[in-house]
Amino acid sequence: MTQYVKIPKERIGVIIGPKGETKKLIEDKTTCQLEIESDSGKIDVTCEEDPLKEFRVLETLKAIGRGFSPEKALEILDDDMLMLEVIDLSDVATTPKELQRIKGRIIGRNGRTRELAETLINVKISVYGKTVSVLGYPEQNTIIRTAIKMLLDGATHGAVYKFLEKKHQELLHSQLDSIDFY
């Protein structure tokens, strides 16, 4: 069965990679075939053996299309629990100026907010076009979605940092609780 994904045309080159290396790497790693239409941004994915692998390849391509580097996006193929979540900002921002302001709040001064969120919650965040995308495990993505919603609703960066610190501690404790010391 063949599935397809459409990504921004300016990201097609990233998926192909230098001398077609990224495309070949994805195909070799998954035994799937990618058929790329550069002028439309449409990519057909055909995986003969494994429909789940097809889904993971589509997610990987979407992640690259949403601004992640191929190195980060390819982690999706290695870890079945890693999820891509795309948050559309066009519902919140009605003008280009408002979109810029919102993206700026999410990224923070000199990238501080995004960097802190990535470090504390152990996710990867990409702000691209009219979207914010998160690459992480389901529990982590839920935390980041909440933090982004707080920023969109006008919460101060300080309040969001406190929320992230608290969730970081909770994640650490839940990881410690799952370790059997006996």
Image (cartoon, rainbow, N blue to C red):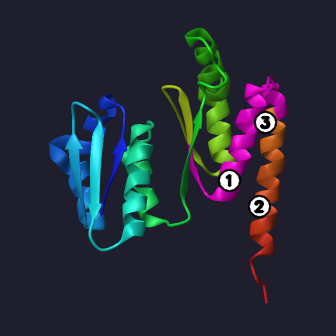
Q: Residue at left 22%, top 30%?
A: 39
User: Foreground: 170 or 3?
Assistant: 3
Please tell me which of labels 3 and 1 falls first in the chain. 1
Please tell me which of labels 2 and 1 falls first in the chain. 1
Location of mark 3 (residue): 161
As displayed, is residue 22 above or below residue 117? Answer: below
Q: Please, what secondary structure does the residue beneath circle 2 have?
A: helix
- The magenta segment is 134-159
- Quarter of the figure with residue 182: bottom right
Say whether residue 4 is left or right of residue 55: left
As displayed, is residue 134 above or below residue 103? Answer: below
Of the numbered discs in the image, which one, if any, rests on residue 140?
Answer: 1
| Residue 108 in magenta stretch | no
Within 10 Å of the Cα at label 3, are there few (<14), some (14-19), or many (20+) other Cα atoms? some
Residues under numbered marks 2 and 1 in contact, where contact means CB atoms less than 8 Å apart: no
> Visible in this render: residue 148?
yes
Amino acid on which the number 1 mark rests in the picture: Gln
User: Foreground: 133 or 88?
Assistant: 88
Amino acid on which the number 3 mark rests in the picture: Tyr
Q: Quadrant of the N terminus?
A: bottom left
Q: Main secondary structure of the magenta part?
A: helix
Cα–Cα gap, marks 2 and 1 = 12 Å
Location of mark 2 (residue): 172
